[in-house]
Amino acid sequence: MINFNKNSAWDLIPIDLSQIHNDVDGLLVKGERLMMAFRTVRDQLVFTNKRIISIDVQGITGKRRSFTSLPYSKIQFFSVQTAGFMELVPDSELFLRFANGFEAVFEFKGRVDIGEIGRMISEYVLG
């Protein structure tokens, strides 16, 4: 589960953009594009060209969803941790601190190009 009360989301694996809940389309603003997406068992994390959207799937049926928007414009600083060389499970991590002091940590499982994520965030934070 992506639980921002605990400031972390673990075991995110990449998914095709076509697997994102259709509900995200209704949240996008003019000019906003989907860039990449990840999932846990039920929840999803979506990177657009303007923000990160978390989708917390709730309830037994999964029809109830909670959406959280983390705009790049509010990121104060971030860091990435790459997977180590020759690790059995190549995990990487993204740490974000927002201007209001909120922190989020995302751990990605498997072969995720964390550098691409870092470059994308840099482009929107510094651009």
Image: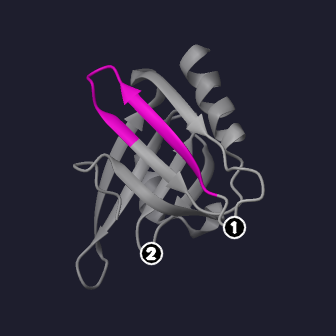
Q: Residues within 10 Å of mark 1 (few under 14, many from 20)?
A: few
Query: What's drawn in magenta, residue-wise?
Result: 91-104
Residue sitting at x 31%, y 46%: 7
Q: Along the line of sight, which residue is nearer the eye, 24 or 3?
A: 3
Q: Mark 2 points at which residue?
A: 41
Q: In the drawing, does residue 70 fall left or right of residue 47?
A: left
Residue sticking out furthest to the top: 127
Q: As rendered, which of 46 and 104 lies closer to the eye?
A: 104
Depth check, front residue: 40 or 65? 40
* Mark earlier in primary sequence (1, 2): 2
89 part of magenta stretch: no
Count of all numbered marks drawn on residues in the image:
2
Q: Is 14 above or below relative to 127?
A: below
List the single residue furthest toward the bottom. Answer: 61
Q: What element carries label 1?
A: loop
Depth check, front residue: 64 or 3: 3
Query: Which element type, helix, strand or loop, lies under badge 2?
Result: loop
The residue sitting at 42% across, 44% down in the picture is 105
Amino acid type shown at disc 2? Val
Which residue is the site of mark 1? 88
Dominant secondary structure, magenta = strand
Q: Is residue 45 in sight in this rendering? A: yes
119 sits left or right of 75 in the view? right
Indicate left or right for 57 with 40 as reference.
Answer: left
Q: Quadrant of residue 97?
A: top left
Q: Which residue is at a point 44% across and 33% down the rendered structure image?
A: 96
Instruction: Tell me if residue 94 is in the magenta stretch.
Output: yes
User: How far across and down, in percent of the image, does residue 65 sit?
Assistant: 29, 65
Q: What residue type is labelled 1?
A: Leu
Of the numbered discs in the image, which one, if any, rests on residue 107? none
Residue 6 at what x, y percent from top left? Answer: 26, 50
